[in-house]
Amino acid sequence: MPVLGATVVDKNWGNGKYYTGTIFIILMGLAPITLTKNIEISMYSWTMFCVTCSVIYAYNIICNGEKKKAWVIFIISALGAAGTHYYAVLVEIFIYLFLYITLLIKDSKNIKKCIVSAIITIIGYIPILPFFFHQFGVAKDTFWITETNLGTILYALRLPFEGENIFIFSSEFTALFWTLIIGSFIHLFTIVFSSWSKKQTLDKTHVFALLCMLVIACFLGSCLILSKLIRPLFIGRYMYVAVGLVWLYLAIVFGKILEEKLAAPMLLGLIICFVLFGYNLLLDREYNTGTDATVSYLDSVMQDDDILINNFEECANWCLEYYFPEHESYLNCDEDSFYKNELYDFSLLDSTAWYLCKGELDIPEEIIEKENLIIEPIENLRIFDIDKYYHFYIYKITKKN
């Protein structure tokens, strides 16, 4: 992303003063959400890069549709986005749609380019379809999102500015900057509409900035509508695939108003917002999770044939298998599990089990008596932690001789 900011972004909108590219790099690098998503072993960061790259080159096509290089990079980026996250497909559909509308308004002869690029994109996506259907087949019976509503969309809008821990934050600063975005959007719209009504030449930068926000609005609106028509399909973190458009829009707006000497305090205010409402907890959750202490403790007490049981979710087993590859991990959860419900059969227990328990002990008394289980709380039920998601008590479970 810094390379994009220092090269293409700055070339397109910097006017030789490096304002827009520098602001884009600062926003992209200092946003609280990037402190977690850009270091996760997942495809989110690649998806965000590909989506941002595709929209940047869509602007290059708007400016000069004759450049084959811009078309090639645009299509490759769009396919990269679609291949790394399914919700990027929806974002790219709106990017293509608005690009085609803009090109056709500019010159109806561009319809041939639109058709050809659409065909190439569809052909390029065909090799991705088997992976899509395979993943869909795996996930369709265990799809875990239970609700998508207006609150989910508001969560998504706060995500870029406050990170993934917004449930404990106040949203006043975020509201301030969304006010800036909405206010500047209205201002740019009035300028573009005035120029269009007077049949004057439209400012491409103004049009492009408006389209960035329209893509986000259509993306979130479509996610909400599809979730109501089909089933809950969207959660706030999926907004990350399009977050580059927010930073690009703000960079363009800040760059435009820098000449009025207003961008510096606004940018400083945004960074202060990041620090006050994101960094401390994000850094603590990311790097001071207590994982080392928990792993060290369990390594010190577990024997070779001991097993681990948790009442979180199936994902926790994958996490435990990473930290304790020599020990089997099992799930004991019959409700509210994201991926599957599965109760451990304690009649099979022939060694010591270490039960990682979220909340109060949930093994029924009748099972304890029937299976002759001895359950010992560890360290007076102090809370242990693994990674940034799992916080639990530990019980040592054995059978009476």
Image: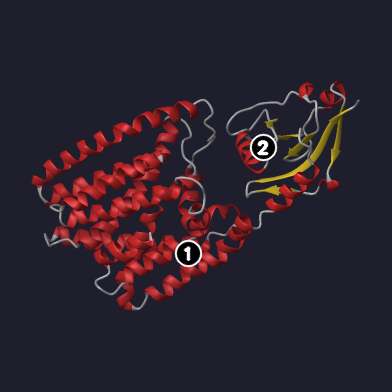
Q: List x then y, in percent, for residue 313.
A: 63, 35
The residue positioned 34% from the left and 49% from the top of the image is: 51
The residue that mark 2 highlights is: 312
- The quarter of the rendered structure image containing the C terminus is top right
Residue occupied by mark 1: 30
Q: Considering the numbered disc 2 on the image, is that residue within a helix, a strand or a loop?
A: loop
Residue at x-position 19% and y-position 41%? 117
Residue 271: % across, % down: 48, 68
Note whether 28 is above or below 122 in the view shown.
Answer: below
Q: Is residue 257 above or below residue 198?
A: below
As drawn, the label of residue 401 is none
Query: Residue 83: x and y, percent?
Result: 36, 39
Q: Residues within 10 Å of mark 1 (few under 14, many from 20)?
A: some
Residue 367: image location, x then y, percent: 82, 24
| Residue 182 seen from this side | no
Residue 155 shows up from this direction: yes
> What is the spatial separation of the Cα atoms under label 1 and label 2, in whole angstroms?
32 Å
213 versus 353 height, above or below: below
- Residue at 47% in and 49% down: 156
Quarter of image, res 56: bottom left
The quarter of the picture where the N terminus appears is bottom left
Above-or-below relation of 121 to 239: above
Nearer to the camera, 337 or 321: 321
